[in-house]
Amino acid sequence: MTLLKFKKIGLESYEPGASKLSRFSNIIKLSANESALGTSPKVKSEIYKKINFSKYPDSKSKDLRLSISKKFSCDVKKIICGAGSDEIIQIICQLFLKPRDEVIVPQYSFLMYRIYSKNVGANVIYAKEKKYKISVSEILKKVSKKTKIVFLANPNNPTGTYLEKSELLKLRKRLRSNILLVVDDAYVEYMKNKNYTSGLKLFKNSNNVIVLRTFSKIYGLASLRIGWGYGPKKIIEAMSKIKPPFNTNSVAQLAAVAALHDKSFINKAVKHNFFWANKLKKKLNNFNITTNEVTANFLLLNFNKSKYSANYVQKKLEDKGIILRGMQSYKIKNALRLTIGNNSQNKLFLKSLNRIFKNV
């Protein structure tokens, strides 16, 4: 019998953080940067009123794109929607890259940049970071004739650091005009620092920048897989031709439109995050666990000066049913990433951490 042959896939795959612990029926998951407050009740109500499961979704996400255009004052023809911003990254790589092209990513960055780049045969080049911060100078050092794309998230995941407006503008100016810059604005709603400006605001009229946005974080729609990209009209048109025809489902489209309109829920989520992130940061400092400044809905916990290692604390927390994200896949040593949870989750985390360090 002749067996079917297929390509050997010698590539890394994305390994999400743990979401279950076998010995617990209910766990506290603080590992995936999901919304602390869940999904807006208005979003749920809107879905129940309008969804028709028997019909195919709008292949062009027209209503959602129009809502995005109105909310952010941008050109609807420059918007593409995808099954999470992950899919937008994948489409960008399919469109721009061929084998042995080079893609530059920061040393510590969202794993899908490198995974999708490698999937199409491109070589991923890592630019060193300085104290966990993206370095414009290090990125520029890595540019070669083969460089086609630079990916970065601002604020960055998993480090929580960010490039100031002037630094991001400098990067785009110093890169060759035929190198695509992709700026991931995934955590933009949480960012309040005055020296920060979103990629969308900076590059709304650029001809060589694509900006990514997601509905998985502040909007609480992670399970629906919905995100969008904004870029030059010709590039968006080309991306739209190679995306799957019904890549965003009707529930996701309806939910995203409703989420954009619920300003009170967004404001509540931002206030909750700011309060708890700062409180957690202060408490963690008492145990000599250092963190980044508050820029997103997570904190990167560094245990180099702490009494216990990250691995020890992670295991002890899991013994209490609490999951944080280990940083091994990001190649950050002795660190954990903590997602800001809801009130009860954050209180229980602090109580558990206190018991660990007091050997109770």
Image: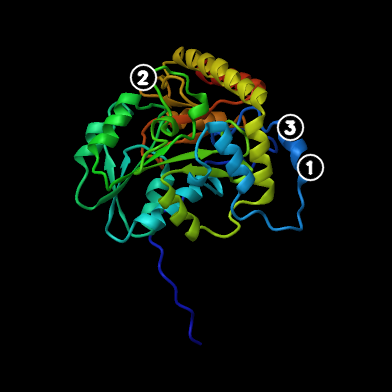
Q: Nearer the viewer, mark 1 or mark 2?
A: 1
Quarter of the image where one finds residue 27: top right
| Mark 2 surroundings: few (<14), some (14-19) or many (≥20) residues within 10 A | few
Residue 23: image location, x then y, percent = 65, 39
The numbered dot on residue 42 is 3
Structural distance between the alpha carbons of marks 1 and 2: 50 Å
Amino acid type, mark 1? Tyr
| Residue drawn at the location 55% of the way across and 41% of the way down | 18
Q: Is residue 349 left or right of residue 210?
A: right
Q: Is residue 309 above or below residue 175?
A: above
Q: Relative to 125, is 58 on the left or the right? A: right
Judged from the image, the secondary structure of the residue bearing numbered disc 1 is helix
Check disc 2 and give the amino acid type: Lys
**Marks 1/3: CA–CA distance:** 10 Å
Earlier residue among tags 2 and 3: 3
Residue 58 x %, y %: 65, 53
Mark 1 or mark 2, earlier in chain? 1
**x, y (%) of residue 305?**
36, 19
**Residues under labels 2 and 3: Cα distance?**
45 Å
Note whether 12 is above or below 275 in the view shown: below
Which mark is drawn over residue 48? 1
Marked residue nearer the N-terminal end (1 or 3): 3
Disc 1 crowd, CA 10 A, few/some/many (<14, 14-19, 20+):
few
Amino acid type of the residue tagged 3 in the rendering: Lys
Mark 3 surroundings within 10 Å by alpha-carbon count, few (fewer than 14), some (14 through 19), many (20 or more): some
Asked where in the image residue 32 lies, by quadrant, the reply is top right
Residue at figure coordinates x 32%, y 38% from the top left: 106
Looking at the rendered structure, the secondary structure element under dot 3 is helix
Residue drawn at the location 44% of the way across and 56% of the way down: 238
Q: Seen in the image, is 293 located left or right of residue 267?
A: left
Question: Does the rendering let one see residue 163?
Answer: yes
On residue 305, the disc is: 2
